[in-house]
Image: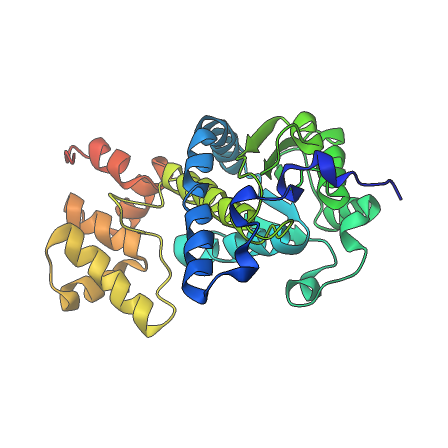
Amino acid sequence: MNSVDLKKIGTEQRNPNTMNIDSLSTLDILKVINNEDKTVPFAVEKALPQISLLVDRIVKAFYQEGRLIYVGAGTSGRIGILDAVECRPTYSCPDEMVQCLMAGGMKAMTKAVEGAEDSTEMAVEDLKNIQLTEKDVVIGITASGRTPYAVGAVEYAKFIGCATGCITTSPNSEIAKKVDYPVEAITGAEPITGSTRMKSGTAQKLICNLISTTSMIRMGKVYGNLMVDVQPTNLKLVKRAQSIITQATGVSNEEAQKYIDRFGSVKKALFAILSGIDSIEEVTQCLERNHGHIRNALKEVGVGRD
């Protein structure tokens, strides 16, 4: 096993602002940690141009029937899984469209699997098991930027022709040098030395939110700021579906539900009301021609919406 020089990893440095954290009162500990947390969005902000390039490439992949594959170990893998599993209920995308491979498998979500993050071979095997193709985009998530599982995954992905990206919070990292679309949000030393579930984990979650949400907006799954591809699979989501239509059109909840029942989805129901088109077939075809973008479909039928 290759040796690891912690002195060269940004997230492993000692934080001068928290040297005496163990001697503080509960409230003062909270204040110190919170002050450190406040720096995270600014680190992410600096990375927005990098994130923009990666999102554009992901959207291109989606339109070509490619997938977004996060890859990570430990905290990084768990954050990738959180982002991936929430895409289907929020945006009605297939489970395989956005997914995450975690070192050690799903059992590592709740219990550490010793040595899994150090295996490049396991990363390659996991990617082969999901039948990775050159249409896909693989993003390695690693705070240190050197986790073998994540690095091995992007190396294999590049070998077979995939676009590759990374999310890291350490400067001058190994993985950032290997991928096509590096995202580097340099969060600095953690409040507790090396505890990357803190600032690094927060930055990774913010970035994953940005990547998946912006990609779905670009795919036409949002109208205004309403999630028009939501799946009404429980009572709360049924009410949300009704609310989306009432907010966008002014009809009552009862009328909204009638349209949802008739047209089979929130998006089709909403477009039917806004366009005045009564034919289920015509509504479906118009949305399909415009790749699900309600605004573009409305323009096609001559209904102007700002």
Residue extending furthest toward the right: 1
Q: Give the image's coloring scheme.
A: rainbow
Q: Quadrant of the N terminus?
A: top right
Residue at (74%, 32%) from the top-left corner?
Answer: 160
Residue at (11%, 59%) from the top-left corner?
Answer: 251
Residue extending furthest toward the bottom: 235
Residue closest to the eye, 100 or 262: 100
Residue closest to the eye, 186 or 23: 23
The answer to whether residue 300 shows anywhere in this view is yes
The answer to whether residue 96 shows anywhere in this view is no
Q: Please give the count of numbered marks on the rendered protein.
A: 0
Horizontally, residue 157 falls left or right of residue 199, namely right
Where residue 111 sits: x, y (%)? Answer: 69, 67
Horizontally, residue 77 falls left or right of residue 31, namely right
Q: Quadrant of the C terminus?
A: top left
Residue at (74%, 41%) from the top-left corner?
Answer: 6
Q: Is residue 31 above or below residue 180?
A: below
Residue at (78%, 38%) from the top-left corner?
Answer: 5
Where residue 34 sits: x, y (%)? Answer: 42, 53
Q: Is residue 30 above or below residue 181?
A: below
Q: Is residue 75 above or below residue 274?
A: below
Residue closest to the eye, 113 or 58: 113
Where residue 154 sits: x, y (%)? Answer: 70, 36
Where residue 261 sits: x, y (%)? Answer: 27, 65
